[in-house]
Amino acid sequence: MRYLCLVYADEATLNALPQPEVDALIDETLATNQALAESGQLVLAEALEQVEAATTVRVRNRRLSATDGPFAETREQLGGFVLIEARDLNEAIQIAGRLPSARLGSVEVRPVIDLQRERSGP
Amino acid sequence: MSQGAAAEPRARIERLYRSESRRVLATLIRVLGDFDLAEEALQDAFTAALAQWPRDGLPANPRAWLVSTGRFKAIDRLRRRARFDAALGELAARLDDQAPDPAGQDDQLLEDDRLRLIFTCCHPALSPDAQVAMTLREVCGLTTEEVAHGFLTGPPTVAQRIVRAKAKIRAAGIPYAVPPPAELADRLEIVLQVVYLVFTQGYGPASGDAVVRPDLADEAIRLGRLVAELLPEPEALGLLALLLLQDSRRAARATAEGELILLADQDRSRWDRARIAEGAALLRRAISSGEVGPYTLQAAIAAAHAEAPTAQATDWDRIVGLYDLLVRADPSPVVELNRAVAVAMRDGPAAGLALIDALLAAGQLGGYHLAHAARADLLRRLGRPDDARAAYTRALGLTRQGPERRFLERRLRELGRG
């Protein structure tokens, strides 16, 4: 199965980190991604721009609206994602726990649905 | 073929249902990969047994027969439904040629199925409410109504929790598996929590009018036995010891009218000696492993009470020592409160009161009725009736359970008006 690991962290805390710690975090993240890629468990991993760069898109009554800001206002913001390949949720949870961000913030693990299979009929 | 089967086949099949249905279900879930399909298959298999066994006699291995029959019936069902959903046809075909005949599989695999079922129902990705509901429903075989009754909620609420939990298991890919050794300790802790929660709900319901809800306490002990038997880890043994030792006092805990009787006032001849002996033996096994966890320590405290011939003969020094260890193993304000009560018994009410006041000053127990009740009792023993009355009144304001409320009201009446 594929699982999307959504990485949440408090941007204020991250912005307050001294540069050497930021560098160490980036190195550790790149190394973790590399290790997951080598074990065949990484599909895609990206870090996201800060939440000020977010736009929420909605369509209501066939009208598209784009609004500034993220979907939900919480203390922790979505800061990145890792798309992984895991046998089951247990393996996905173990992988999510290896992400350095799991320590600083939280990682939401979401199963990816296969849209082709969800369609009824051919 | 058994002669007895023809004599009273229905009763025998019913007995078999009680003893085997959960094992058969546990294996069918693995074989079929789906809870709902497995439950239907289980019912189909027993329906088939009711039709065939009285005529043909009992099969040599009824459990294996039920699993095989359930599997065939499930494949049948999927084929019939495949007319509306082609994917089910593929699934049926896959089940048909993939799965080896489960009847021929070894005992260890079948025993492990019961553990798989327990660990899946107690998966951390399910909410605690869902873990309890799933465990009682799937592992213990309680009906939705029984689960709802035990937890003072409506059957629709329980049914919805179970439907959601099964949907999550399916959609999130929660595996039907015993966790690997590296994860076992953390995962077992959740299983033990669920067992203990079921027991405390049975033994000291948070609200309502009964002192003990015996069905749930019995169910928890049965479940604790199953876990300790399948996975004899020290804390699994320690928890079972704790349940048995606490439950040994069941008959002495309340009057015939359902009024609460405190430990010190209980008629110790009514304690269940067989349970105490079994609990003490399990406790020794748990301690001999060398790792002593929170459940084992609580069991050791319960054993210290159980082994005292009279309340006066209680070894409070030993109990305080065990609480010291428990505070380190599982720090919580409630454990500190219990330790303070033990200190009061060993060193006098003033020493205990100082500890409780410090705990309340730290601000974590203000809303906990037993903190105020314990404080009230110490004030009463110190000859401070006005303060005691105020503390009992505080406790009463925080208590929802009928027998506990009446106990506090009795104490208030005994103190009279100030």
Image (tube, coloured by chain):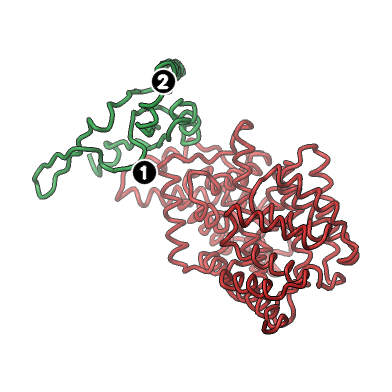
Chain colours: A green, B red
Name the secondary structure under disc 2: loop
Name the secondary structure under disc 1: helix
Badge 1: few (under 14), some or many (20 or more) residues near its Cα, within 10 Å? many
Counting from the top left corner in percent of width and height, residue B380 is at 74, 72
| Residue B303 shows in the view | yes
Of the numbered discs in the image, which one, if any, rests on residue B89? 1
Q: Left of B206 or right of it: where is B97?
A: left
Number of numbered labels in the structure image: 2
User: Residue at horizontal 84%, vertical 62%?
Assistant: B274
Counting from the top left corner in percent of width and height, residue B323 is at 76, 50
Counting from the top left corner in percent of width and height, residue A84 is at 39, 27
Q: Which residue is mark 2?
A: A18
Residue A122: quadrant of the picture: top left
Is B328 drawn above or below residue B217 in the view shown?
A: above
Q: Chain of mark 1?
A: B
In this view of the protein, which residue sits in the foreground, B296 or B377? B377
Residue A18: quadrant of the picture: top left
In this view of the protein, which residue sits in the foreground, B117 or B397? B397
Q: Chain of mark 2?
A: A
Is B347 drawn above or below residue A121 in the view shown?
A: below
**Which residue is situated farthest in the left direction here?**
A63
The amino acid type found where label 1 is placed reads: Gly
Badge 2: few (under 14), some or many (20 or more) residues near its Cα, within 10 Å? few
The amino acid type found where label 2 is placed reads: Pro
